[in-house]
Amino acid sequence: MGTKLQMIYWKGNDFWVGKLLEHPEIMTQGKTIEDLENKRELTEGEHHLPFPVTCGFLVHSDPCMGFRISIDNKILAYCTDTGPCERSLELAQHADILIHECAAKKGQHYANWPHTDPVEAATIAKKAGVKQLLLFHFDAAAYRTLEDRKDAEAEARQIFENTVAAVDGFCIAL
């Protein structure tokens, strides 16, 4: 039986508390300020929880962290809400699974809202030497159908073969 994970969230600073109050429906840190205060804060760097985790800020208009988790001799890299950046590449080095955002379509760029397209995510996976790439965090305005996600998967596979586009309810085992 694998090790169980206890969710520990980046609490951040007053900025996040303000965002929670403005948009409680989209924040995953908790439903109330008390929920935030009762969670363990993660800062940039290495942490030793019941498992080792490295946290690093990614490139986004709002502060956003990526994570590298080592558990049961496996490495999981998780990079969401980010444009392509060196930190994603660092966190993904030789990971068994890289879960990377794919909010942008190929060649699409947001002026002040950095996100990654399937080609950029696949390039990061290839350079980092990961075993598998899982695309997720698809922009609903850009990816209106599951076929759009499959197209993104096909584009990424041209660069990194072992790519899967996530859908609601998707599960993967380490």
Image: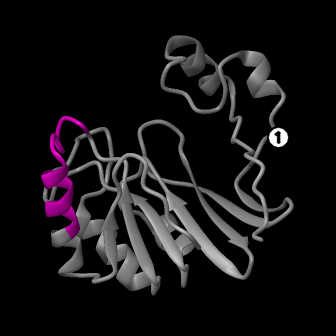
- Is residue 96 within the magenta segment? no
Question: Is residue 158 shown above or below 120?
Answer: below
Q: How many marks?
A: 1
Residue 6, given in percent of the width and then of the height, sits at 78, 49
The residue most toward the front is 1
The 10 Å Cα crowd at callout 1, few under 14, some 14 to 19, many 20 or more, is few
156 displayed left or right of 85: left
Q: Quadrant of the N terminus?
A: bottom right
Q: Residue at x 22, y 78 (%)?
A: 157
Secondary structure of residue under mark 1: loop
119 displayed left or right of 162: left
- Is residue 144 within the magenta segment? yes
73 displayed left or right of 138: right
The residue most toward the top is 21
Question: Is residue 79 shown above or below 6?
Answer: below
Q: Quadrant of the C terminus?
A: bottom right
Residue 98, given in percent of the width and then of the height, sits at 48, 70
Q: Amino acid at mark 1?
A: Arg
Q: Residue at x 27, y 41 (%)?
A: 139
Residue at the disc numbered 1: 40
Residue 66, given in percent of the width and then of the height, sits at 56, 56
Q: Residue at x 21, y 55 (%)?
A: 149
* Picture quadrant of residue 63: top right
Q: Which residues are magenta?
A: 140-153
Residue 34, given in percent of the width and then of the height, sits at 79, 18
Q: Residue at x 22, y 42 (%)?
A: 110
